[in-house]
Image (cartoon, rainbow, N blue to C red):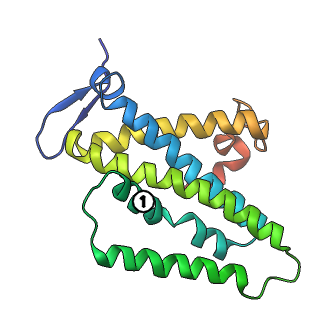
Amino acid sequence: PFALRAKNLQSGKRWTFKEMFLSSASKPALITATCWVIWMATALAAALQYSFMLADLFSNITSVFILAYRLITHAPVKRGEIIGIAVALLGVGFTFVGPQESSKSMSDLATAFLVATVGALAGAIYLMVTEKMATDVPVDVFIFVNSFYGWVIVTIAAVVFEGSTFDFDETNGIFGIFAPGNLYLFPV
């Protein structure tokens, strides 16, 4: 019988389908895949709302949430980390008081900040869970499972939010990249 297997490159241990998708590693991989998709989607939404530069700045304040979590849980925190976060937050604050793009309002900036900050929280969860998973599961297996879940989540989101279809339609099809009209995309 066919069994999906992945082989760990370092230890040589083989991971079966059951171990990859139905084990204790599966739930954290699903969490990280979901958080990663939210992190990237909110960064894109914030960029469309205001600007790429500010969306990039706001969506990458994950360290603020990680440091806050570490302070709440009484984990060790270095003084340099606190200073770094203070400087980062000062920079974020300056974006609100600096000159604004003429076509964008302050409410556009606030909306982009809120959307990207929610994404940064998801990014912080992604980074913290991934850090814990690195000790439990080989990286290659974790990346495979995480990527698979991410693909499923993005595919479902495309169908639900964008009206995509499960066919080879060049415009709306999930598999449209493989449509005969797009074969020029693939090198021969």
Question: Horizontal placement of 129 versus 61: left or right?
Answer: left
Q: Is residue 169 visible?
A: no
Q: Nearer the viewer, residue 97 or 13?
A: 97
Tag 1 secondary structure: helix
Residue in the image at 64% along x and 84% along y = 94
Question: Horizontal placement of 70 versus 91: left or right?
Answer: left
Q: Nearer the viewer, residue 100 or 169?
A: 100
Residue 77, image x and y in percent?
28, 66
Residue in the image at 66% along x and 74% along y = 54
Looking at the image, is 64 positioned above or below residue 53? above
Residue 73, image x and y in percent?
33, 51
Q: Nearer the viewer, residue 86 or 8?
A: 86
Residue in the image at 63% along x and 60% along y = 116
Give the residue furthest to the top: 1
Residue in the image at 86% along x and 73% along y = 105
Residue 67, image x and y in percent?
39, 62
Question: Horizontal placement of 81 versus 112: left or right?
Answer: left
The residue pinned by badge 1 equals: 68
Determine which quarter of the picture holds residue 114: bottom right
Determine which quarter of the picture holds residue 2: top left
